[in-house]
Amino acid sequence: MIQFSDVSLMRGSKVLLQDANATVYPGHKAGLIGANGCGKSSLFALIKGELHTEQGDFNIPKNWQIVSVAQETPAVDRSALDYVIDGDKQYRKLQAQLISAEETHNGEQIAHLHGLLEHVGAYDIDSRAATILAGLGFANDVMKNPVSDFSGGWRMRLNLAQALLCHSDLLLLDEPTNHLDLDAVIWLEKWLQRYTGTLMLISHDKSFLDSTVNEIISVEQQQLISYTGNYDAYEKQRAERLRLQSLQYAKQQDQIAHLESFINRFGAKASKAKQAQSRVKQLAKMETLLPVMAASEFSFEFFTPPKLPNPLIKMEQVKVGYGETIILEKLHLNLVPGSRIGLLGKNGAGKSTLIKLLAGEKTPIEGIYETSAGLRIGYFAQHQLEFLRGDDSALAHMQRLDNKATEQSLRDYLGGFGFRGDSALSKVAPMSGGEKARLVLALTVYQKPNLLLLDEPTNHLDLDMRHALNMALQGFEGAMVLVSHDRFLLASVCDDFYLVDSKQVQAFDGDLDDYKDWILKGDKGADKNLNTTNEKSSAKPDRKNTKRLEAEFRQATKPMRKAIEQYEKSMADAHKKLQLLEEQLSDTEIYSAENKPQLKKVLAEQAQLKSNLEETEMQWLDTQEQLEIKLQEFELQNGTL
């Protein structure tokens, strides 16, 4: 088993782990989660022997074969298939020894090596490698292409294929889905479910974690906290743990206050000196509990677009491609405010091509393509990270976008994306992929788009930032087209799914579970799930219409929900102000004669705040009740929300 005992780990001067403990048993599949920069990848480096603990013990069975994904891929002329097989060093070594034995006609050695090769699976290694490559999106005709022909993202898939092909007792995967599309993610999920070794997986994809792991190790406040079950189970257990921790923290603060009060009152009295010293020792020995962590540092929302023309984009019989190669044809699609479309389809089917067409990076070869005068496009794609200016700061990028805004207003805005203090002034070049992605998102949101095009927006984003993006997209009023392998995001923010397949883009009559079934069954035609008049579609509920009704309900009740949010904010502010006033009233000096005017002022302010709070609470309750009534009416009319 893998065991971390009182481990302290540092990177440079930064403390990542302090007296951390965790155990991973053989055959377990553990998801390692935590904010970017908390030390997850460093923990992997420790396991691989690339780092050493500052203190504490780390143990792993000496005979275990540890396999991880290489981070660099040389631009070699080896074919993709041969490159993947090269990853099995033991096989290549035995293969070379066999060639040498055959050259010397050493029959005994040849027989021995054939036995060893059979043991390592040499006689089906080509087919296994080809199967893995196919699962990761490589077509049969490109497997013989040289590695140098592939882009960086595809080379990372080759490295992943190498790791999956090799025999391993422990498989370390660090964000393996970042360079994959949804189809490849679904395939990898199934592969990992069948994997019999020990797995440690770093991922920020909730659905992927739910399907692949049976244990979560969370890096929290420089500790390793273990939770049983998948990610869904982790969320429930952590909520309960934080609730108990909050109660324990409050109880301890009361105890500390009581001890300190006794010490302050009686520490100088001879008759109480012994008891006071006892309290001092008791206080010193008390293990300090940390307060429950605050909410996510990321919080932002989309601005209301200046205009919402209808339709935003109209296309009929559009054909698009590269040169003479047609990627998509017969496109018929109208994008209107409120459209929330998720694009599904196999790798290379044309999802990104459609996004580029909508973004204006591609022009139609033929057909009608019309855009409204007030169209404002917000486009996020991974390649845009490369266009950030490395010597500029996040603030400088914002100032270039809006030179009339004050520095403070821009810094306040950037704070919602995690750029606070000096981080807003730091150069972009050394930033992590996640930080750069957050900056591109900040620039995109600031431009107040009414059409949002998102091509794999969650790559490199941690769970907190993904949650913030999810929440922001819920309130976006324009049209949105999303390509993502993050099923949680797709399911949360999309009302309709369109399947890109066989040069066509058609409505997909089903949800993501249906799409997963379609992928795993290898149904090429997609006829069963397209929005056509067949038996299945007539037997199933009209999901598209249901989602349209849900969108209309959200829009109709938006003023109510906004009012509820405002009331909740007002109540929270009032409680904070009341707490400050109560602290003033707890000070005995305020009751002295010279402070009588101040006492009157505080008491009057307290009375006014309590009155205002009571009125706000009543308004909040009334609005909540109205929303509940609206919800019940909707459910009665439409079956379910």
Image (cartoon, helix red, strand yellow):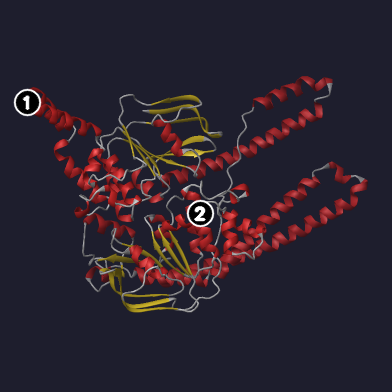
Is 271 in front, or is 34?
A: 34
Residue 125 screen position, x and y as percent = 18, 40
- What label sits on residue 598 in the rendered view? none
Relative to 135, is 24 on the left or the right? right
Q: Quadrant of residue 570?
A: bottom right
Residue 162 to residue 566: above or below: above
| Horizontal and vertical percent position of residue 453 | 43, 65
Per the image, label 1 sits on a secondary structure element best described as loop
Residue type indicated by callout 2: Arg
Left or right relative to 608: residue 365 = left
Give how far apart the Cα atoms at labels 1 and 2 are.
62 Å
Pointer 2 local density, CA inside 10 Å: few below 14, some 14–19, many at least 20: many
Say which of 32 and 87 sits in front. 87
Q: Look at the image and tell me in which quarter the N terminus lies.
A: top left
x and y percentages locating residue 55 in the rendered image: 51, 24
Residue at horizontal 80 percent and vertical 22 percent from the top: 272
Question: Is residue 159 in view from this perspective?
Answer: yes
| Residue at x 50% of width, y 40% of height | 38
* Earlier sequence position, callout 1 versus callout 2: 1
The amino acid pointed to by label 1 is: His
Residue designated by label 2: 438
Q: What residue is pinned by disc 1?
A: 105
Which of pointers 1 and 2 indicates the residue nearer the eye? 1
The residue at 30%/25% (across/down) is 63
